Amino acid sequence: MSSPNAFIPFTKPTIDEATISAVADVLRSGWITSGPKVLEFEKALSDYLGGSIVRCFANGTATMKIALQVAGIGPGDEVITTPLSWVATSNVILTLGAKPVFVDIDPFTRNLDLNQVALAINSRTRAIMPVYLAGLPVDLNHLYSLAKQHQLRVIEDAAQALGSSWGGIRVGHQQGPHDLVSFSFQANKNLTTIEGGCLVLNNQTEATLAEKLRLQGVTRQGFDGMEVDVLGGKDNLTDVNAVIGLQQLKQLTHFQERRTELARHYFEVLRAKKLDEALLQLPPDDFSNSNWHMFQVVLNLNRLDTDRNQIMGELKELGIGTGVHYPVINQFKLYRDLGFKPEDTPIAQGIGRSILTLPLYPTMTNDDLERVVNSLEKVLKRHQA
Ligand SMILES: *Cc1c(COP(=O)(O)O)cnc(C)c1O
């Protein structure tokens, strides 16, 4: 099917004809913004997550911001999080006037090191905000017990982790009693609505507050049938996006199965070439918990005579797209100006410089994958120091 020289992107959404006609139906229906399709999507997500309370938002960033607002996070509060994430994670903390506290990561999982989290907790700490990089959760039992012990909220940035699980239970299904779980449906995620997100809440009061916060704080009650009692924004999902999500959700298990097969194949091929012994570090081969949102290797830069940029450029010339997820957040100017330093989280800093996302998406073929690995081998060997 795919031509031998076609460009292989690092990710690609899978949109079928049924999705396109479902979108056309909504566009023709006379109701195109938030309406019945959003309610149907929230119900379908709730079913997928074992009956949890779910509300949808315009994107993952808005979802996380509202999660923090629901948890009452504001000025003077500290939120412990990881520097190895998309900058949205800590931007929302700053947006609410709170302070992100960056804790270093575990070099193997590339997620927050929970032992270091425990050491960073103080009287101003209000919440822990872990990120499930590439779809691999942190140890959720450890996380919830830590939060319980210190009476902290947990706001899970599960943007990449829809379909992932821990101990056989889906992320967003069995959360701790003070937990909020945020997912993103941005174009690159395992399930996309183009842009969108959803929040799992643990009680009806907080769900009602989240509904108000996503639409100007308005509730349908009181004097003249409308009341505003909190400051909300404009963060609602549209029916056009929701109907894409409904179609994607039907295919999600199938998408994840294919991602998992491809991840297994990556391990086989990369190990057969022994690239993992000298030139790169493989991701954790956790096939019971990860949804394989990404397949990320860490380059052994001290065994190479060049940097990641050069490697990515040469791969691109061979028709292979790769990505960087992510440079550490505490090295960005905005954060350095606020006094954060990448050297404070040295493990994350090193991995942020050398992590590389290889192509992985449901319609990728085994031949595509082998082309990726052969090209990677060629480029790395060219630069072996
Ligand atoms: C995608 C993503 C987000 C933000 O989601 P948007 O829908 O793009 O706003 C946040 N955190 C992580 C880790 C992500 O991957």
Image (cartoon, rainbow, N blue to C red):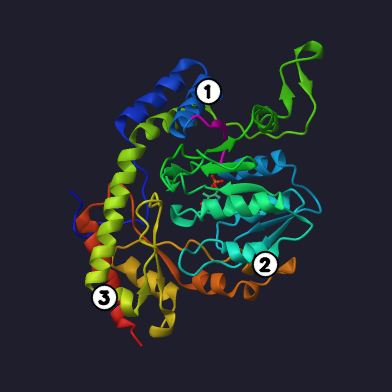
For image coordinates 21% across by 55% down, the residue present is 366
Q: Secondary structure at mark 2?
A: helix
Between label 1 and label 3, give the one nearer the viewer.
3
Q: Which residues are magenta?
A: 51-59
Per the model, the C-alpha gap separating discs 2 and 1 is 41 Å
User: Is residue 99 inside the magenta stretch?
Assistant: no
Q: Which mark is residue 333?
A: 2
Q: Position of residue 48 (x, y in %)?
A: 43, 33
Q: Position of residue 252 (x, y in %)?
A: 36, 38
Per the model, the C-alpha gap separating discs 2 and 3 is 38 Å
Q: Position of residue 321 (x, y in %)?
A: 35, 61
Residue placed under numbered mark 1 in the picture: 39
Q: Secondary structure at mark 3?
A: loop
Q: Are marks 1 and 3 in contact (CB under 8 Å)?
A: no
Identify which amino acid the numbered label 3 is placed on: Lys
Residue placed under numbered mark 3 in the picture: 274
Between label 2 and label 3, give the one nearer the viewer.
3
